[in-house]
């Protein structure tokens, strides 16, 4: 290590910070398309909660996989077809809210009716054009994407319940994307969503649906990160759980993930616990996700390099700074991005456990440093037994 | 804590053949039957950080001066509420310390107002007092320089007669020796004038950080406080400047054989480089290759082959196109980043204000903590040893000693008698007894000290404390309840060594055990340095090593400060690293967790 470095090698201590500024997708915005990398808060009513949170992450310069939102304007266009409006209204009127089994059937009829209706030409051409731009940007033909519903409801606090959030993964090809956009739209009319709106007294037309189309990540490894130490609430650390492949293995509890603590400020890995990760979920050549055995030599090796752990910590800290409170983020390491640019963030939401605890100040005697020194001398080991 | 205890100082079996060793040290510092009840009840730890080797009689003077001075500032000057001094003893040539803590709440409380007034005065006026301190040190150094140990003249100078002086060289010689003793005590007083307060302020900031961020590494705290441009690093920086100047002046090849001192000096004669050397060598090369506490440690200024070799290494690097300069701006920026990030992570404005205040005070006091070591242990002590060698030279001429270094085998009070013997024999013009009396005694003492040096003293003695609370023991020596428990239980797993996570990173490589500063030349590229303690002047060997492990040292020990500066993994305060690890074994050092693993 030292042969090539100067004697006083503080340079080693100076972290090199990766540039995470993503290349912008080369495509224009339309009434129907909002690219995540050009998202502004005023777009929120048109793109829904899920899409705006991805856009917001991009605004925070977090490396979110590229993609676009199909706005609620596009969704609104389908209701200019009067026969569709009438058919759906007839079906809605026929609902007896006490007969759950019948409701399920009626809801399914409504969804079929919506899905059978042709998508307005202008919307189709906007989706096709945007998807083509995304393929060019990723340099992948028929790039696999996630197609997600992202409901929006003006003045309603819980749009996510008011409209069920369907997500379709590993969708390839423009026609398939259009097809799944329709399924997202129609997902506003599941029996549960209808029942929920009915019980809350919300109007069906108060809810609109935006759809997110985002490049799928094919992760070498993935996991979550908390921007504090979950055991003691120390905000100078980031806790990372990580396992091979897609996040399912960890979420389902089938695998004990590797666990790391990274010092946010010093950017050092201060604790590591490597587990036996016997299975992983991976995308097969046939384009489906399968559970697979992890080969022996990978099982007990760390699934994330130290450099990537530091990158994850820096990004998690960036999210925390942007949102102004501790975060719980999902990340992945993309197989198809070059090393150094392959850490991507999938989601960031507020951490809830420690953030809800009442904050007590550390300083009890501000303004009187001498008293503080006296009490320090009286109990110098006060709260500092961190050596294990 | 278990019922295990350390050996009683009265039961420890020393090495064979050292009968009468007690006579080498003052009666007041050896364990004694008269104080047995008191001494047997206490906990004593060996300060191997400063005194890793058995002390010769004169060298042990500095144990007395240093620890009495340290204690005096705690107990009598600042009235540190929970801490009086540190009691000390010598057992078979090694120093053992026992902190005197105050447990009585009412007594502690009664000292608080005095402490606040007195320490408060220093904190408020720190910069001015520190400037003043630098002046005091320089004046004391001039005074020590003026001490005259030259042999007595055959006949007094005529001016003694014509000026009506009325006293002679024999009186002057004794007076100078007395004055010399006074001045070295004075300088050790100065050493502790600020130090304990400096540590107190640092500890206060440290405690705040640990409370705000329970898992913050000590290193994170140290990084916020550490100075960027520190006098202690100056000697090494000067070597780099000289290396560059040598290349510019076409004198680089002169250093190819650094051991050929006379050839290099001849080659430098009359050059601008020589002028530059002379300008910086005093004070900056008054730099010991050890802790400064032993007379035989070599200093750069007296053994120029040491800095010559480092200069050659730097020349090689520069010629290979390497940038050996310190990136001051980047270091400062990194320090500012660390501070602002921790500050941002605090929850309230109140905390941020307290954080800034405490950091501010820690930074005001810290230059002293970092720099005193150069001014006292290196600069002043280099001079002190040089003066004592002048005295030894005189004793050789008088026949009392057979070689210069014999002078260090006298206790300091014995020299008073020797000087009177010499003076009176000179006055009477008759034979002195000393030249017959002392040589066999000194020869025996040399034998004893050699045996003591080969002996491995116990880490600690007596009753282990329930909990270590004495702030300076924790801060300066890194001795905590956990480390004491570790010493007691150390007869378990021998393949793992643990200590303080002093400098982050992981490295593997062959271990190189270095017990004496004279052996640092043996270190080869890619090895891991394992030593009882390292000294700041070993800095230039750090480019060669992959990591560093020391037996003792707290978070602010000189070793820890320097290792962090060099950005290589380090684990300090392992207690037994040098006895568990063998030369050449492959080891893994994890400076982020403080663990060392022996791999073969």
Image: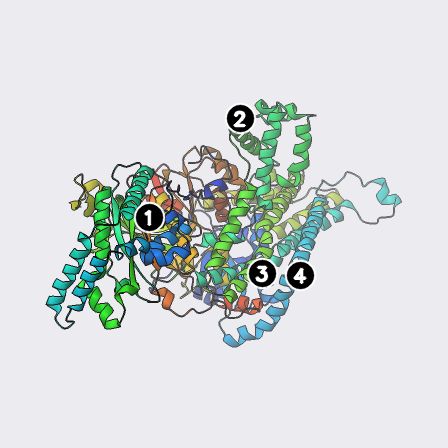
According to the picture, the residue beneath numbered tag 1 turns out to be: A68
Residue B109 left/right relative to A385: right
| Residue depth check, mark 1 versus mark 4: number of the one nearer the observer | 1
Distance CA(mark 3)–CA(mark 4): 13 Å
SS for dot 3:
helix
On screen, residue B249 versus residue B106, left or right, reads right
Up/down of B138 relative to B101, above or below = above
Residue where numbered disc 2 is placed: B319
Q: Select label 3 or label 4 by which is in front.
A: 4
Task: Count residues near mark 1 (Cα–Cα under 10 Å), then give few for <14, some for 14-19, many for 20+.
Answer: many
State the image quarter where residue A95 is shown.
bottom left
Along the viewing direction, whichever of A341 and B445 lies nearer the viewer: A341
Residue at mark 3 shares a chain with residue at mark 2: yes
Query: Which of the two discs, 3 and 2, labels the residue nearer the N terminus?
Result: 3
**Distance of mark 2 from mark 1, alpha carbons?**
55 Å
Task: For marks 3 and 2, give the one nearer the viewer.
Answer: 2
Q: Can you give x and y, in whole percent of width and height, for residue A82 in the image?
A: 23, 58
Between the residue at mark 2 and the residue at mark 4, the CA separation in whole angstroms equals: 47 Å
Front residue (pair B500, B211): B211
Q: Is residue B59 visible?
A: yes
Residue B586 sits above or below residue A195 on the image: above
Residue B314 falls in which quadrant of the image?
top right
Question: Which percent across, then down, holds residue A113?
Answer: 17, 56
Quarter of the image with the C terminus of chain A is bottom left
Q: Is residue B198 visible?
A: no
Residue B213 horizontal/vertical position (percent): 43, 60
Labels 1 and 3 touching (C-beta < 8 A): no
Kindly identify which residue carries mark 3: B197
Looking at the image, do the residues carrying marks 1 and 4 touch, with CB atoms under 8 Å apart?
A: no
């Amino acid at each position: 290590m030292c042969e090539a470095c100067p004697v006083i090698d503080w340079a080693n201590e100076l972290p090199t910070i990766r540039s995470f500024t993503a290349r912008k997708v080369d495509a224009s915005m339309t009434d129907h398309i909002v690219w995540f990398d050009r998202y502004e808060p005023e777009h929120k009513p048109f793109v829904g909660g899920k899409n705006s949170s991805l856009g917001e992450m991009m605004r925070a310069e977090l490396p979110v996989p590229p993609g676009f939102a199909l706005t609620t304007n596009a969704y609104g266009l389908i209701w200019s077809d009067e026969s569709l409006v009438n058919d759906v209204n007839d079906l809605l009127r026929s609902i007896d809210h006490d007969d759950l089994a019948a409701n399920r059937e009626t809801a399914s009829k409504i969804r079929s009716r919506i899905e059978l209706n042709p998508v307005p030409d202008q919307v189709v051409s906007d989706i096709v054009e945007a998807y083509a731009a995304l393929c060019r940007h990723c340099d992948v033909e028929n790039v696999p994407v996630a197609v997600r519903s992202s409901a929006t409801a003006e003045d309603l606090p819980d749009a996510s319940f008011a409209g069920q959030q369907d997500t379709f993964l590993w969708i390839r090809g423009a026609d398939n994307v259009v097809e799944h956009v329709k399924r997202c739209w129609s997902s506003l009319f599941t029996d549960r969503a209808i029942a929920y709106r009915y019980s809350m007294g919300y109007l069906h037309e108060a809810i609109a649906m935006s759809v997110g189309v985002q490049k799928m990540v094919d992760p070498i490894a993935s996991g979550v990160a908390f921007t504090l130490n979950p055991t003691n609430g120390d905000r100078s650390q980031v806790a990372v759980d990580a396992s091979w492949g897609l996040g399912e293995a960890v979420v389902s509890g089938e695998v004990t993930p590797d666990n790391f603590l990274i010092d946010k400020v010093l950017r050092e890995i201060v604790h590591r616990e490597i587990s036996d990760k016997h299975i992983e979920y991976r995308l097969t050549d046939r384009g489906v996700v399968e559970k697979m055995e992890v080969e022996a030599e990978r099982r007990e090796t760390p699934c994330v390099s130290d450099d990537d752990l530091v990158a994850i910590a820096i990004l998690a800290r960036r999210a925390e700074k942007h949102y102004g409170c501790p975060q719980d983020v999902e990340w992945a390491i993309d197989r198809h991005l070059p090393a150094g640019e392959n850490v991507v963030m999938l989601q960031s939401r507020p951490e809830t456990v420690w953030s809800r605890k009442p904050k007590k100040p550390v300083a009890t005697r501000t303004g009187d440093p001498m008293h503080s020194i006296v009490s320090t001398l009286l109990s110098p080991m006060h709260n500092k037994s961190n050596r294990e | 804590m278990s019922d295990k205890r350390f050996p009683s100082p009265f039961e420890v079996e020393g090495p064979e053949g050292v009968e009468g060793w007690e006579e080498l040290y003052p009666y007041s510092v050896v364990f004694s039957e008269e104080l047995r009840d008191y001494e047997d009840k206490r906990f004593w730890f060996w300060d191997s950080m400063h005194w890793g080797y058995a002390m010769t009689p004169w060298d042990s003077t500095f144990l007395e001066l240093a620890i009495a001075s340290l204690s005096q500032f705690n107990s009598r000057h600042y009235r540190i509420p929970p801490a009086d001094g540190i009691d000390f003893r010598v057992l078979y040539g090694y120093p053992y310390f026992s902190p005197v803590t105050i447990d009585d709440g009412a007594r502690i409380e009664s000292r608080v107002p005095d402490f606040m007034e007195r320490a408060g005065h220093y904190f408020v006026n720190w910069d001015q007092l520190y400037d003043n301190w630098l002046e005091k040190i320089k004046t004391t150094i001039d005074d020590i320089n003026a001490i005259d140990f030259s042999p007595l003249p055959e006949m007094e100078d005529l001016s003694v007669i014509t000026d009506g002086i009325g006293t002679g060289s024999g009186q002057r010689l004794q007076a100078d020796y007395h004055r010399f003793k006074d001045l070295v005590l004075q300088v050790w007083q100065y050493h502790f004038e600020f130090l304990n307060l400096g540590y107190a302020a640092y500890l206060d900031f440290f405690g705040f950080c640990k409370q705000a961020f329970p898992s913050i590494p000590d290193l994170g705290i140290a990084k916020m406080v550490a100075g960027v441009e520190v006098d202690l690093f100056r000697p090494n920086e000067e070597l780099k400047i000289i290396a560059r100047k040598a290349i510019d002046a076409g004198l680089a090849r002169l250093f190819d054989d650094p051991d050929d001192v006379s050839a290099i000096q001849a080659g430098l004669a009359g050059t601008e480089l020589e002028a530059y050397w002379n300008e910086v060598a005093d004070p900056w090369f008054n730099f010991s290759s050890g802790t400064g506490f032993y007379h035989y440690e070599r200093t750069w200024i007296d053994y120029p082959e040491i800095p010559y070799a480092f200069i050659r290494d730097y020349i090689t690097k520069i010629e290979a196109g390497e940038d050996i300069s310190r990136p001051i701006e980047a270091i400062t920026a990194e320090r500012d980043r660390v501070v602002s990030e921790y500050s941002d992570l605090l929850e309230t404005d109140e905390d941020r204000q307290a954080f800034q205040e405490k950091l501010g005070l820690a930074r005001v006091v810290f230059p002293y903590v970092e720099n005193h070591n150069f001014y006292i242990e290196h600069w002043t002590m280099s001079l002190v040893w040089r003066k004592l060698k002048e005295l030894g030279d005189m004793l050789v001429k008088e026949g009392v000693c057979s070689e210069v270094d014999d002078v260090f085998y006298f206790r300091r009070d014995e020299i008073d008698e020797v000087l009177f013997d010499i003076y009176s024999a000179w006055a009477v013009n008759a034979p002195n007894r000393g030249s017959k009396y002392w040589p066999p005694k000194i020869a025996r003492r040399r034998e004893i000290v050699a045996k003591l040096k080969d002996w491995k003293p116990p880490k600690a003695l007596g009753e282990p404390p329930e909990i270590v609370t004495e702030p300076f023991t924790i801060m300066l020596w890194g001795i905590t309840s956990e480390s004491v428990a570790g010493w007691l239980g150390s007869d378990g797993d021998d393949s793992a060594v643990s200590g303080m996570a002093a400098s982050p990173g992981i490295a593997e490589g062959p271990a190189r055990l270095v017990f004496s500063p004279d052996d640092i030349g043996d270190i080869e590229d890619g090895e891991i340095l394992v030593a009882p303690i390292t000294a700041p002047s070993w800095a230039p060997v750090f480019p060669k090593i992959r990591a560093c492990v020391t037996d003792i040292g707290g978070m602010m020990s000189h070793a820890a400060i320097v290792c962090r500066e060099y950005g290589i993994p380090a684990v300090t305060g392992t207690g037994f690293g040098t006895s568990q690890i063998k030369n050449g074994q492959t080891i893994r050092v994890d400076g982020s967790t403080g663990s060392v693993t022996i791999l073969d």
